[in-house]
Image (cartoon, rainbow, N blue to C red):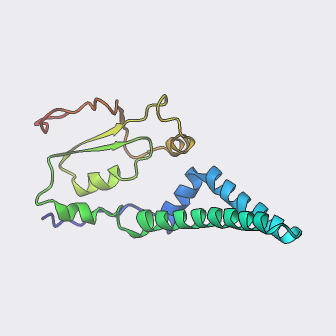
Amino acid sequence: MITRTPKRCSRARFQGARQILRLNWPWYALALGLCLVGGGLLGLAPLPLGVALGLAAGAGAAAAWGILSLMASHWIYDRSGIYDLAWLAGLLQQPPACWVNVHAGLDETSPALCALFPAAESRVLDIHDPASMSEPAIARARRLGTPDQAATPANPRRLPLPDAPPTSSW
């Protein structure tokens, strides 16, 4: 087992949940709007019971989705320890000779992998394909950039990797 303590990625409190909110803000704005409109209509005038129940259910569902998705994001990205990579170091008997990090535009782990495995050959591949990955959240994530390590553009269906670990520089 590797005994080196991994370098923890420098992350602010609630950074993961804030990043999810930032990258997917139109969905959260829509959910907030539904809550406000539904709640406002319920408070303005007496409505038929079916309409009132429908508005309450819609506003409740929108609120629940927004709150629960941000709570799940916080738990996964901020509280789970996924970014400190201690879990990865604990899985390996010895440091790898090489590693590959594949992402679609926002790479937050390559610097920590470089610090954890400084002697290993490393490759960072960016599999973003604008024709098939047109989601606005991915475009927003790509604009955040990855300043620490340049990535090689790659086709996700044919990654430019050897069949066996390299014995020399890639």
Tell me the residue at 72%/68% (across/down).
56
The quarter of the displayed image where residue 10 is located = bottom left
Q: In this view, does 77 lie to the left or right of 64?
A: left
Q: In this view, does 54 lie to the left or right of 146?
A: right
Percent coordinates x, y for residue 66 in the rendering? 59, 63
- Vertically, is 95 above or below 14? above
Q: Is residue 48 visible to us here?
A: yes
Q: Is residue 12 visible to us here?
A: no
Percent coordinates x, y for residue 41 in the rendering? 83, 64
Tell me the residue at 47%/65% (across/down).
72
Q: Residue furthest right?
A: 45
- Vertically, is 58 above or below 24? below
Percent coordinates x, y for residue 160 in the rendering? 26, 30
The quarter of the displayed image where residue 48 is located = bottom right
- Vertically, is 17 above or below 133? below
Tell me the residue at 28%/32% (across/down).
159
Q: Is residue 23 left or right of residue 168?
A: right
Name the one closer to the observer, 158 or 168. Answer: 158
Percent coordinates x, y for residue 134 in the rendering? 52, 35
The quarter in which the N terminus is drawn is bottom left
Q: Is residue 117 left or right of residue 130?
A: left
- Vertically, is 143 above or below 109? above
Tell me the residue at 73%/58% (across/down).
33
Name the one closer to the observer, 81 or 148. Answer: 81
The quarter in which the C terminus is drawn is top left
**Number of marks:** 0
Name the one closer to the observer, 45 or 28. Answer: 45
